[in-house]
Amino acid sequence: MTPSILLTRRHAMGLFAAVLAEPVLANTAWADTLSAARGQTVYFNAWAGSERINAYVQWAAAELQRDFGVKLQHVKISDAADVVKRIRAEKQAGRKDTEGTVDLVWINGENFAAMKRDGLLSAPFAQALPNFQWVDTVGKPTTLVDFSVPTDGLESPWGMAQLTLFADTQRLPKPPQNMAELLVLARSQPGRITYPRPPNFHGTTFVKQALIEHAPDVKALAQPVTPAALAAQAAPLWRFLDALHPHLWRGGKQFPQNSAAVRQMMADGELVMALTFNPNEAANEIAAKRLPITVQSWQFAKGTIGNTHFVAIPYNAPSKAGAQVVANFLLSPAAQARKADIDVWGDPTVLDVARLPAADRARFQSASRPGQVGVTAPVLPEPHASWVDALEKEWTRRYGV
């Protein structure tokens, strides 16, 4: 046997051994993480404005304690931006890498962009989670890009969201399919349509949807905002809102504080339609008998703005191993299927259900419910996170007084 052939065979055997070793090393590393996590308490800072979500977190806590010996403590918050401020203050005060008060935070959008920019996040971890293999990174590209900012493994996807509208078909049999049709409807039914006041998340999302539909160059929205870009791309938006607002609830001089208020006004007959970022919200409300069975959800024909929400680990989390175990559990088919169940929460999954083993696929099989979106529209990507603050400030300057 010639030396060259021998070398080639040895090289091939070495590569084969390396390939075999990769899953072994990965399994060993995760076993070490599980061992380190046992006995840790994970302080999970998460929005607490929904009893369904709070109950889901309590269920997850019981599962994690039983199966992994990790205690999940839900720190109930109203705004993730407050958590970002606290972590930033801890860094400015010189808190070490294990001396923080937050182990895991529910986050996305401009808050993630701020944490990434300011070095407030722990090392990349998401792709190393065993259950990340089931994430649909192709069909749901926002699982890797958060408001046009690459996640780079710094946050783990948890659920999907897309701007969705809903109305009682007995009062609105032909719903608008874009912002132009919405303006026509508002003119025909003055005072019966509105949206939450920015910087409320749903209100800002409504404004961003209108921006995307009217911007001269949609691709420019994926780049960090500049004064020139804002002036050029948002000019048609302000013209649209100037035309729309006089026909809104209370003449566009006042706006509800949140989407829950809009939903209640629709339920009371004061408005003809409402909006949400959870495609299953109307179905949830119908199941809870807070909306009539004649309510139907829809998304604009050419698409509505959508994104993924995530969990992230701060740079100074005391229980980093435990936080990774929690994030991995939240990605498990069992946890994702329960979260997607309308009777539990109704938050769409980030997983590629078609690739799951048959037993796990079966977890997601359920009959359609009244109020669900009939035809899912394309997801329009969020503008770059920097556009949020710029739009909210300009909206407030123009319409906030």
Image (spheres, grey):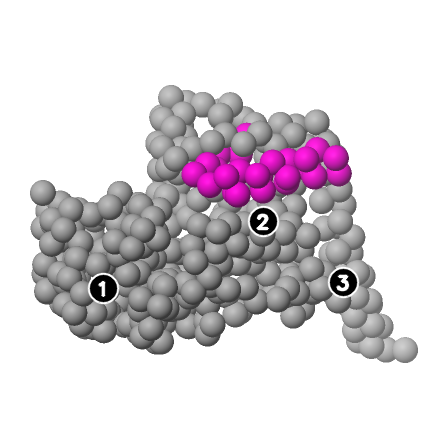
Dot placed on the residue nearer the N-terminal end, 3 or 1 = 1
Rendered residue at 70%/33% (across/down): 65
Q: Are marks 3 and 1 in contact (CB under 8 Å)?
A: no
Q: Position of residue 159 (x, y in %)?
A: 51, 54
Magenta run includes residue 222 = no
- Residue at the image position 58 percent from the left and 42 percent from the top: 56
Q: Nearer the viewer, residue 55 or 357?
A: 55
**What is the three-letter code of the residue carrying label 3?**
Ala
How crowded pointer 1 is (Cα within 10 Å; few <14, some 14-19, many 20+) is rated as: many
The disc labelled 1 sits on which kind of residue? Leu
Residue 275's x, y, as percent? 34, 57
Mark 3 → mark 2, Cα distance in angstroms: 20 Å
The mark found on residue 211 in the picture is: 1
Residue 313 in view (yes/no): no
From the viewer's perspective, is the residue at label 1 or at label 2 nearer?
2
Q: Amino acid at mark 2?
A: Val
Marked residue nearer the N-terminal end (3 or 2):
2
Instruction: Magenta stretch: give its range.
Output: 43-67
Residue situated in front as seen by the camera: 103 or 308: 308
* Cβ–Cβ under 8 Å for marks 3 and 2: no
Callout 2: 10 Å neighbours few (<14), some, many (20+)?
A: some
Q: Nearer the viewer, residue 112 or 392?
A: 392
Q: Position of residue 337 (x, y in %)?
A: 63, 55
Q: Main secondary structure of the magenta part?
A: helix
Residue at 31% in and 69% down: 172
The residue to which callout 2 is attached is 344
Residue in view at x 43 percent, y 65 percent: 294
Which residue is identified by label 3? 359
56 vs 195: above or below: above
Nearest the viewer among 186 and 48 is 186
